[in-house]
Image (cartoon, rainbow, N blue to C red):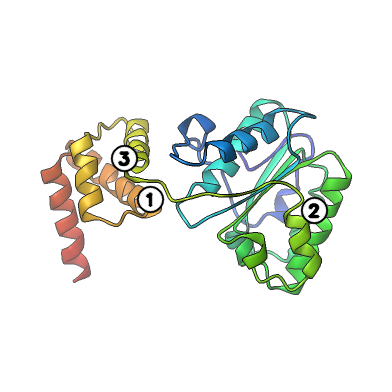
Amino acid sequence: MSPVDGPNRLRRSQLPLDLRLRESSRFDTFESEASGLAAATVRLLATAGAAGERQVFLHGAAGSGKTHLLQAACHAAHDAGRSCVYLPLAELASEAPPDVLEGLDGIDLLALDDLQAVTGGEDWERALFGLINRVRDGTGRLLLAARSAPEALGCRLPDLVSRFVWGPVFRLDLPGDRSIKTILQMRAAERGLRLEESVADYLLRHESRDLESLLRLLDRLDLAALAEQRALTIPFIREQLGRSSARTS
């Protein structure tokens, strides 16, 4: 599914990137030991029509689940027949000017990720300020996400922070080991692989506990396992990690 969907479709020429939602980013695959309230609030915003909050701000470190929830909300809105847009601003800012945000206020659900990539820039801040005001004047819903809390984003436009906190603000914590293992096992199952708990434990002991890094590693292991027709066993993973170390040394 395209990140731009529904009757209020943007012109493709406005979006220089071929952005797509991850099929695996759904509410039922969101695994967190401490962010249940945030997930429930975001789900309600995406699916409840006139009920629920109209704006939610999520913040947390990379790997805390912000992008997953924003994309899950877009999937849910699309399934409910609503128009939706997901924009990762860290990618978009290097490819497009701030006026790419024009014309988005007619979208039912607008999800803006990586706000920290554009705050501090006067043109982007004014574009965000105007967009949030227009969405709030209409009937749309806003999901906003950044690595820092609104007051810590270094905004040059003082009133922009007040717009960011017009709705609930949730901090997402990094997942614990149990959640990371569950996420790895679910991602492996999506690829038709079985990741035993002992193998997941091995990855956590020998690799970074950063979830995004582990998921990228799992993608590489999946390709290697497919090419060699091997299972994801500890000896196979040890062999692959050894090859990677040899290539980078």
Residue 232 is drawn in which quadrant? top left
Label 3: state its secondary structure.
Answer: helix
* Mark identifier at residue 211: 1
What amino acid does circle 1 point to? Answer: Leu
Rendered position, 217 above or below 188: below
Determine which residue is flagged by label 2.
132
Looking at the figure, which quarter contains the N terminus? top right
Quarter-wise, where is residue 156 in the image? bottom right
Residue at 67%, 31% in the rendered image: 44
**Where in the figure is residue 67, as x and y percent of width and height?**
54, 48
Which of the image's four quarters has the C terminus?
bottom left
Q: Distance between the residues labelled 1 and 3?
A: 10 Å
Pinpoint residue 133: horizontal percent, then vertical percent. 85, 53
Residue named by callout 3: 181
Left or right of residue 83, residue 26 in this image:
left
First in sequence, mark 3 or 2: give its number. 2
Q: How far apart are marks 3 and 2 (CA)?
A: 37 Å
Name which of mark 2 and mark 1 comes first in the sequence. 2
- Is residue 190 left or right of 249 when viewed as pictured? right
Label 2 Cα crowd, 10 Å radius (few <14 / some 14-19 / many 20+): many
Please name the residue shown 36% across and 46% down the image. 176
* Residue that sits furthest to the right in the current view: 137
Q: Which amino acid does label 3 sit on?
A: Lys
Q: Where is residue 146 in the image (x, y as percent from the top left)?
A: 59, 57
Assign a secondary structure to mark 1: helix
Q: Which of 215 and 197 is in front in this view?
A: 197
